[in-house]
Image (cartoon, grey):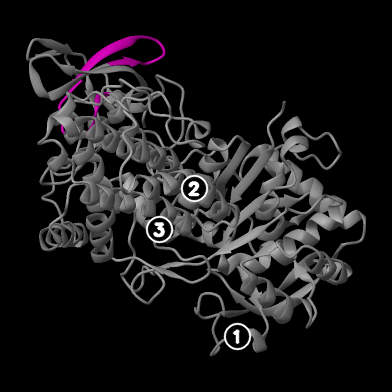
């Protein structure tokens, strides 16, 4: 029997710069929904990726002295690394520079033009470069872009336009007949009252003032503008073909069950995108959810304000699952959430250390102390059992109800209600008192079983939100009962299981003042102006040309048997394999480097390093105080053995 499908997408990240935690929240949210759906038996496809064309990128690449493709390759790599750091389980990372996507974008544009939905004209208006949006005078807020608040500039150019008005009535009808299409409800009312009922203006869908985009096939002076290019990724990346030769993936997963997007791009996804799909005669997505923003204090994150918080920094200070928990738990369903370092510390201490970590640690410790870690349910029923067991039984269904409505923060609260009740149950039953009397030992066994089983149920449910932590808990319980089906009844924890002897501290309490001082010190250090280094003696090109630097792939990497600071690499240069020893063990785990490409000097005389021969040198970039280091790698995959010039 085939599983019910579930296709979820995020908005694709714009590759103009490094994503901050506000951007990262969306991928964590989508991942929680995708993981939960997999847990509950769905065939899930989870798509994310990057939006890589536009004037802003063309300008930034020019300023950096590189090609636009090189620029977006670098940023897309950062985005993907960030998504991977957050332990997100996407099935595909699509890029709008992918060849198959660009080809379909051209075919979509041509089809819409041939059937009369796109026509050539001229645009004259006010343009916001950061948002890549045109506005009329009446749409501006205090003379600035209504989306980002930045100044606009007058622009006039030849362009192609999409006749949105051809489909407005049909879209209004669809929204009215499908009340779940736009969520939350407040967003739906905004789209209908502010945009649809006043009447949609025709949409500019090409640009002729820059070149970094998908060329219009039949008019090479134009490139396809962001709307058709970026929005169509939701179908092209799963195999949509304008000519009807769709992939099995497209036939299986489309229409999307939910497009997860930020509230600031709701108009594009609930007006332009559905109309485009109508024009292509493709079913509309089932739901578009415009999530709120994660703010710093009471303001939106902005590099110009200096209040940007990055996910990588949060992970370095607090760990992946703590960051995932905070992002998911602190974002309300329809209102903006708030993040500060103080709030993260407070939530870790109150929820993760006290409620979750302390419960797991002391329950397992008591099992070891009183029964050598062996779990036995003697079914000696007493006061307070029924209340705990009833809540444990009800919790999966309560979580399901919240997740069905995309109320992820509320779902987490439901799980923590069970954890809080379990902590209260310890106080009510006082296991340490029961342990004093031999005749109460059977009752104590039941009390501990009820606690361990409640923890197991909570851990299975937490797997969608805090996957690593959930697995650690289940490992400490030493149970094989980990499936969602195993928590549909109370009693899945196997009798005579032996819990781990020494429970791991899941989340240690943080000293707020000490932690904040450390964060501020590291932040200040990063922001220090880089001092001009002392120049080395000038060389001529012939000196540099003596160095033979080549690209290689790391086949294996191991710690040096006699030196903690050294790693021993086996490198594939294509034409030969070599061993190089490098003093970077402080900065990398060996397994992190296997499969990566590095740049190495291959014409250094071999030398012995603590008894192991090194046949070259791997290039690295390091701070002056050696507190940070990064190996030098090519920006994109290159053939092994090519020269670095």
Q: SS for tag 1?
A: loop
| Nearest-to-viewer mark from 1 and 2 | 2
Q: Which residues are magenta?
A: 570-590
Q: CA distance from mark 1 to mark 2?
A: 51 Å
Q: Mark 1 packing: few (<14 Cα in 10 Å), some, or many (20+)?
A: some
**Which labelled disc corresponds to residue 399?**
none
Q: CA distance from mark 2 to mark 3?
A: 21 Å
| Image location (x, y in percent) of residue 436 | 9, 36
Is residue 631 visible to us here?
no
The local crowd at label 3, few if under 14, some if 14 to 19, many if 20 or more residues have their Cα within 10 Å, is many
Whether residue 580 can be seen here: yes
Work out whether mark 2 precedes mark 3 in sequence or the reverse, and give the earlier one. 3
- Report which residue position mark 1 lands on: 140
Q: CA distance from mark 3 to mark 1?
A: 35 Å
Indicate left or right for 537 with 338 as reference.
left
Residue at image location 31% in from the left, 28% down from the top? 378
Residue 587 within the segment the image draws in magenta: yes
Question: In x, y percent, where is residue 459?
Answer: 38, 39
The mark that comes first in sequence, 3 or 1, is: 1
User: Mark 3, mark 1: which one is toward the viewer?
Assistant: 3
What residue is disc 2 on?
394
What mark, if any, has residue 329 been given in the picture? 3
The residue that appears at 27% across and 65% down in the rendered structure is 343
Q: Quadrant of residue 591?
A: top left
| Image spot of residue 391 (x, y percent) | 43, 49
Which residue is more in the foreground, 219 or 536?
A: 219
Instruction: Find out whether residue 54 is within the magenta segment.
Output: no
Q: Residues within 10 Å of mark 2 (few under 14, many from 20)?
A: some
Q: Considering the image in quadrants, where does the C terminus appear?
A: top left
């Amino acid at each position: 029997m085939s599983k019910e499908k579930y296709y979820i997408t995020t908005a694709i990240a714009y590759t103009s710069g490094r994503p901050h935690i506000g951007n990262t929240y969306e991928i964590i949210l989508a991942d929680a929904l995708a993981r939960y759906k997999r847990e509950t038996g769905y065939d899930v496809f989870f798509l994310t990726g990057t939006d890589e064309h536009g004037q802003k990128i063309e300008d930034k690449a020019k300023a950096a002295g590189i090609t636009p493709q090189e620029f977006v390759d670098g940023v897309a790599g950062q985005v993907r690394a960030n998504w991977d750091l957050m332990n997100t389980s996407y099935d595909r990372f699509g890029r709008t520079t992918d060849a198959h996507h660009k080809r379909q974008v051209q075919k979509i544009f041509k089809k819409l033009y041939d059937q009369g939905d796109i026509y050539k004209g001229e645009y004259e208006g006010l343009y916001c470069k950061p948002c890549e949006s045109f506005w009329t005078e009446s749409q501006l807020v205090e003379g600035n872009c209504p989306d980002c608040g930045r100044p606009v500039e007058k622009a006039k150019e030849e362009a192609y336009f999409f006749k949105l008005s051809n489909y407005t009535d049909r879209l209004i009808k669809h929204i009215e007949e499908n009340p779940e299409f736009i969520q939350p409800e407040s967003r739906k009312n905004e789209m209908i009252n502010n945009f649809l009922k006043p009447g949609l203006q025709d949409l500019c869908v090409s640009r002729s003032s820059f070149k970094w985009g998908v060329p219009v096939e039949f008019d090479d002076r134009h490139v396809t503008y962001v709307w058709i290019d970026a929005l169509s990724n939701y179908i092209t990346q799963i195999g949509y073909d304008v000519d009807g030769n769709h992939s099995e993936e497209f036939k299986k997963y489309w229409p999307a069950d939910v497009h997860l997007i930020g509230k600031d791009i709701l108009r594009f996804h609930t007006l332009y995108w559905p109309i485009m799909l109508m024009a292509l005669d493709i079913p509309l997505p089932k739901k578009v959810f415009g999530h709120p923003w994660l703010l710093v204090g009471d303001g939106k994150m902005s590099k110009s304000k200096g209040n940007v918080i990055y996910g990588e920094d949060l992970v370095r200070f607090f760990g992946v699952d703590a960051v995932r928990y905070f992002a998911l738990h602190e974002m309300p369903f329809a209102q903006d959430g708030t993040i500060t370092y103080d709030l993260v510390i407070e939530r870790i201490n109150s929820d993760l250390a006290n409620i979750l970590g302390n419960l797991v640690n002391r329950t397992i410790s008591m099992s070891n102390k009183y029964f050598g870690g062996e779990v036995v349910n003697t079914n000696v029923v007493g006061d307070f059992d029924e209340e705990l067991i009833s809540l444990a039984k009800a919790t999966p269904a309560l979580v399901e109800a919240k997740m069905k409505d995309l109320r992820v923060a509320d779902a987490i609260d439901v799980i923590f209600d069970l954890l809080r009740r379990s902590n209260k149950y310890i106080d009510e039953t006082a296991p340490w008192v029961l342990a004093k009397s031999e005749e109460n030992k059977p009752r104590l066994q039941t009390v501990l079983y009820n606690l361990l089983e409640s923890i197991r149920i909570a851990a299975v449910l937490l797997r969608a939100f805090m996957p690593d932590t959930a697995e650690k808990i289940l490992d400490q319980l030493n149970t094989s009962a980990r499936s969602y089906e195993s928590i549909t009844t109370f009693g899945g924890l196997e009798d005579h299981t032996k819990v781990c002897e020494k429970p791991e501290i899941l989340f240690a309490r943080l000293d707020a003042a000490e932690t904040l001082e450390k964060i501020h010190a590291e932040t200040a250090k990063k922001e220090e102006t880089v001092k001009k280094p002392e120049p080395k003696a000038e060389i001529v090109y012939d000196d540099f040309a003596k160095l033979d630097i080549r690209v290689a792939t790391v086949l294996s990497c191991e710690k040096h048997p006699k030196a903690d600071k050294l790693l021993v690499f086996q490198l594939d240069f294509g034409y030969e394999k070599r061993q190089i020893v490098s003093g970077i063990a402080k900065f990398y785990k060996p397994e992190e480097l296997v499969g990566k490409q590095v740049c190495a000097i291959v014409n250094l005389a071999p030398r012995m390093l603590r008894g192991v021969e090194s046949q070259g040198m791997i290039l690295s970039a390091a701070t002056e105080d050696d507190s940070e280091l990064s190996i030098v790698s090519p920006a994109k995959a290159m053939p092994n053995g090519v020269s670095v010039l």
